[in-house]
């Protein structure tokens, strides 16, 4: 092999001929990782700053979340519009509407309760007056009684009965004295499917006497449908409101006593009817109140914000915002480094 090399180099270039030793040439090794590092390195661009774009995108998302959280804290609602959650917002809106209607029902029931209470007071006072008349009649049944003086007191009590009936008016409604018996309907409930539900009172159970169109007692038994102004079942000479014992016989007084006793029973029954109606109204009012509270709690569960969670989230987002601004500032400064390459 050395001979062949000698032949190729010639006598002037033969290292062995010159007396020098042969040293193999060193081959430089370039690591693969070093070359790959330069091949995969991201280039520096003056016009396109990807780091800045990424930082800006993250910061924008953080600010949007921060704005939403601040809105929750200021309004107290997690869902304040359809954009926050169309389904929950729709359900909550309908429930709020129902709660508002139930509030009107509660007000109506409160008014109805006061009306019935007014009528019930009139009935109670009427029973007391009828009992006075009953005692007068018992006294008139005694032989030698002064019927005229007793009649004077009875006449006063009859006028008092008329006054109680005519003055038992609430908001223009009178269940004790009216031109005719009727059914009065009062708002009792509401739901979106069936609308308004009513509580009915039949005034044929409460009407004490009949009045004219102006609400004034008509002193006649013709067409009378009330408890006190109808002709008695036993004494046909008049009603409880207009009988006169000045010249009545013992038999007449006995029959009038029966009619007054019957009237007391009927007026007492009217009081029981109104009392039961009052209880029904109170039960319904409690139900409406509880239902309204339940719906209000349901609306809160759907749309109200959790303030503990919101405050924690706000603090975290504020830190993220500060870090995002810092990151964006660093990314924007990268373009300034390019100038150093040309210095």
Image (cartoon, rainbow, N blue to C red):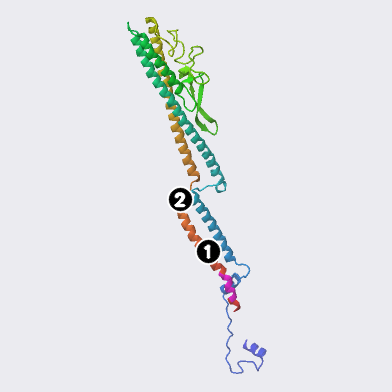
- In this rendering, is residue 143 above or below 39? above
Question: Mark 2 to mark 1: distance in Å?
Answer: 26 Å
Q: Residue at x 51, y 56 (%)?
A: 66
- In this rendering, is residue 78 above or below 126? below
Q: Dot 1, crowdedness within 10 Å: few (<14), some or many (≥20)? A: some
Asked whether 335 falls inside the magenta stretch, the response is yes
Image x and y of residue 64, in percent: 54, 56
Q: Which mark is residue 293?
A: none
Asked whether 57 falls inside the magenta stretch, the response is no
Q: Which mark is residue 325?
A: 1
Q: Is residue 301 left or right of residue 33?
A: left
Q: Which residue is mark 2?
A: 307
Image x and y of residue 157, in percent: 39, 16
Task: Give SS at disc 2.
Answer: helix
Image x and y of residue 186, in percent: 50, 27
- Work out whether residue 316 or residue 257 is closer to the camera in this orientation and state it: 257
Q: Main secondary structure of the magenta part?
A: helix
Q: Is tag 2's residue or tag 1's residue first in the polypeptide sequence? A: 2
Q: Is residue 138 left or right of residue 326?
A: left
The magenta region covers 333-339
Q: Residue at x 51, y 60 (%)?
A: 321
**Residue 343 image-quadrant placement:** bottom right
Image x and y of residue 9, in percent: 66, 90
């Amino acid at each position: 092999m050395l001979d062949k090399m000698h032949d190729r180099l010639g006598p002037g270039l033969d290292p062995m001929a010159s007396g020098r030793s042969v040293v193999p040439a060193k081959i430089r090794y370039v690591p693969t990782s070093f070359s790959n590092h330069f091949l995969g390195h991201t280039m520096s661009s003056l016009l396109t700053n990807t780091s800045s774009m990424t930082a800006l995108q993250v910061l924008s998302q953080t600010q949007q979340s921060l704005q939403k959280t601040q809105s929750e804290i200021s309004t107290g609602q997690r869902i304040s519009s359809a954009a926050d959650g169309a389904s929950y917002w729709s359900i909550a809106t309908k429930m709020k509407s129902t709660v508002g209607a139930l509030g009107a029902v509660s007000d109506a029931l409160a008014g109805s309760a006061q009306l019935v209470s007014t009528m019930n007071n009139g009935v109670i006072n009427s029973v007391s007056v009828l009992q006075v008349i009953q005692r007068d009649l018992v006294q008139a049944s005694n032989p030698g009684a002064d019927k005229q003086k007793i009649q004077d007191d009875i006449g006063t009590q009859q006028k008092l009965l008329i006054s109680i009936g005519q003055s038992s008016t609430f908001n223009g409604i009178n269940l004790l004295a009216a031109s005719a018996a009727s059914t009065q309907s009062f708002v009792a409930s509401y739901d979106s499917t069936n609308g308004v539900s009513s509580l009915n009172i039949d005034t044929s159970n409460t009407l004490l006497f009949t009045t004219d169109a102006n609400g004034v007692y008509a002193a006649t038994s013709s067409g009378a449908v009330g408890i006190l102004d109808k002709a008695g079942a036993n004494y046909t000479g008049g009603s409880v409101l207009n009988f006169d014992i000045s010249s009545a016989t013992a038999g007449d007084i006995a029959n009038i006593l029966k009619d007054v006793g019957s009237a007391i029973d009927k007026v007492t029954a009217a009081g029981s009817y109104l009392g039961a109606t009052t209880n029904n109204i109170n039960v319904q009012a409690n139900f409406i109140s509880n239902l309204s509270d339940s719906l209000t709690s349901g609306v809160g569960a759907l749309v109200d914000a959790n303030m503990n969670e919101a405050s924690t989230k706000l603090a975290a987002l504020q830190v993220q915002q500060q870090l995002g601004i810092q990151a964006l500032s660093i990314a924007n400064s990268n373009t300034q480094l390019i100038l150093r390459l040309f210095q």
